[in-house]
Image (tube, grey):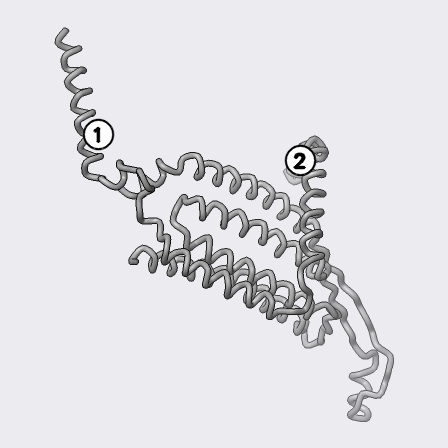
Amino acid sequence: MKTAIKNVLKGFGGFGAYLVITIIIPAIVFTAIKNIEFQGIPIGLSQYQYERIVYWLTAFGLLVSGFAFLNYSSPKQSIRKGVFALVQILVNCLYIWSYKFSGGTDVQLTIFQPFSSYYEILQTGTIGSEDFFKAIVNIFLEDFLMLYMGIYFLTISIKIYDLIDFTLNREKIRAERMK
Amino acid sequence: MLFLLLDALQDFVNVMGGIMLFFYPFLSPIGAFMVAWINAVLSVAPQFNIAFYIVICVILIVAGIIINSYWPGDKPLPGDKSSSEGSQYDEDLLEEDSDIDTDEENSYKY
């Protein structure tokens, strides 16, 4: 029973870590990008997919964290751990890819600034002009994402090797763990 | 010095480009395969239903707790005498070691 409690606590540790890495930090970053200001000039983030991005990150982040719980709570070098680690990596691929299809890799910043705002404010105290200066900045992170996908493919290969190793050397691993 | 550094960087980039071109025929199908299976899974994933993912996450955690309470991984495999009788196993190993030592001693004598 003592081992079971230890395993579950380890699982919750992994779950919490992945919850922070996959949901909380990206959500904070995207919210910050949405509300960013540069030298007093408001940069209206024309990111209409903001909610879509946060939705997919939260959805797959929850799945990744759930499988992280199963992975970290499993005994060391067990077949169970091998299977859950492999599934976690596959779900991680979905999570990483969700950045692309939700639009998270094509961040577009749009800057709106009234042409005559300062003059009109000084003259009338209100902004009446409809002429706006507009600038659009696109940030493409797709290549970076593709590199990550390549790394994940290698990680999948390693996890499959681990699973085969744990299965073939099951008795030896168990005997060592019992010592 | 700066121009030399730029040349060195240019060489480095050329080498990296060569490696990438060499691996491109292998890496490209791998990338296409990854994208294909991920898109297939994502086409089935429910959209704008966060409750579905929360329920799955809770199910995974509860399943993990149940699995660990029944199979914590601290019991030996059925029929595995060596791990269930750890002390006996160690004693057997010690005996084997002592046999080897005596054999070695005898070989030195001869």
- The chain that hosts pointer 2 is B
Residue type for callout 2: Met
Which mark is on residue B93? 1
Indicate left or right for A20 with A46 as reference: left
Q: Position of residue A127 (x, y in %)?
A: 81, 87
The residue that mark 2 highlights is B16
Residue at x 39%, y 57% (from the top left corner): A10
Residue at x 70%, y 51% (from the top left corner): B40
* Rendered view: A47 above or below B103: below
Q: Position of residue A93 (x, y in %)?
A: 61, 51
Circle 2 SS class: helix
Q: Is residue B16 at least partly visible in the picture?
A: yes
Q: Position of residue A11 (x, y in %)?
A: 42, 58
- Relative to the observer, which residue lies in front, B12 or A101? A101
| Residue density around tag 2, few if under 14, some if 14–19, many if 20 or more, within 10 Å | few
- Relative to the observer, which residue lies in front, B99 or A95? B99
For discs 2 and 1, the disc positioned in front in the rendered view? 1
The part of the image, by quadrant, that contains residue B31 is: top right
* Rendered view: B78 above or below A7: above
Residue type for callout 1: Leu
- Relative to the observer, which residue lies in front, A13 or B54? B54
Residue at x 43%, y 54% (from the top left corner): A72
